[in-house]
Amino acid sequence: MRTVIRCDDPEVDPYRWLTSLVLPRPIAWISSVGADGVANLAPHSFFSVACAHPPIVSFTSVGDKDTLANVRATGEFVVNLATLAMLELVNNTSARFAPDVDEAAALGICVEPSTLVTPMRVTDSPASLECRLHSTQTLGDSTLVLGEVLAFSVREEMLVDGRPDASRLRPLSRLGGNLWGLPPDPVAVRRPVQPDEIV
Ligand SMILES: Cc1cc2nc3c(=O)[nH]c(=O)nc-3n(C[C@H](O)[C@H](O)[C@H](O)COP(=O)(O)O)c2cc1C
């Protein structure tokens, strides 16, 4: 037996079902800067890889938010990965701050200059992806943002043999409702293809 939820039922809120079923979603703690120079930091869990060649990531702004306005105005943003130790701060940056408030400064979150883009990266973040706006796509009440990754800035201690190690990154994720996902328990499984075929 299954319960079937029809999305054409006006009583159904697809947001609740999507966020409770598509999980865990990694958190993009996005730093950006407005045209007026005011910095911004906010979490987005509608976040994924969109393309590897060229390297493109996506996030979705549900409605119009400061992050989206900044990215549109300046064409740049940084995705900072978040860890369990940062949960409280990540959550606090999701509060409704006025556009002229720099969340990192207001909450005492340490940031430092990025390498290739103007938005700062979060100092304690294990890895930051410096992005240039590729394009946006309006989807109903939301906007899908595609950003080309110009640089991966990874803390040395997150690397094993020069590659990011999931057991060290220990990324935080988002589940349904107000639930968060703890760092995963990685397991290595060989795929039935040659490594150079892997996508
Ligand atoms: C863990 C978490 C994930 C979130 N994911 C998203 C998201 O994917 N898209 C979105 O629009 N808002 C998301 N939010 C809400 C935004 O962070 C919140 O609206 C924030 O105030 C936006 O900030 P801004 O206006 O400074 O950009 C999320 C909040 C939390 C706590």
Image (spheres, rainbow, N blue to C red):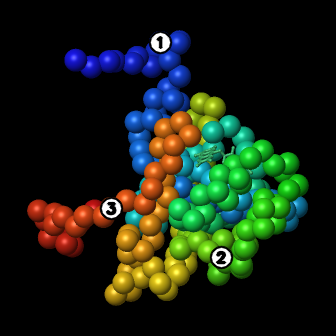
Instruction: From the image, state whether disc 1 or disc 2 is nearer to you.
Output: 2
Judge the density around disc 1: few (<14), some (14-19), many (≥20) Cα neighbours within 10 Å.
few
Looking at the image, residue 26 lies above or below residue 132: above
Instruction: From the image, state whether disc 2 or disc 3 is nearer to you.
Output: 3
**Mark 3 or mark 1, which has the lower sequence index?**
1
Residue 147 visible? The answer is: no
Q: Is 58 positioned to the left or the right of 102 in the image?
A: left
Residue furthest out toward the left = 192
Residue type at the position of mark 2 = Thr
Looking at the image, residue 46 lies above or below residue 197: above
Residue 37 place in picture, x, y as percent: 85, 65
Looking at the image, residue 47 lies above or below residue 52: above
Instruction: From the image, state whether disc 3 or disc 1 is nearer to you.
Output: 3
Residue 58 place in picture, x, y as percent: 52, 53
Q: Nearer the viewer, residue 106 or 129?
A: 106
Residue plotted at (81% across, 66% down): 105
Residue that carries the numbered disc 1 in the rendered image: 9
Q: Which mark is residue 34?
A: none
Residue that carries the numbered disc 3 in the rendered image: 185
User: Which quadrant of the view contains residue 137?
Assistant: top right
Cα–Cα span, label 1 and label 2: 45 Å
Image quadrant containing the C terminus? bottom left
Judge the density around disc 3: few (<14), some (14-19), many (≥20) Cα neighbours within 10 Å.
few
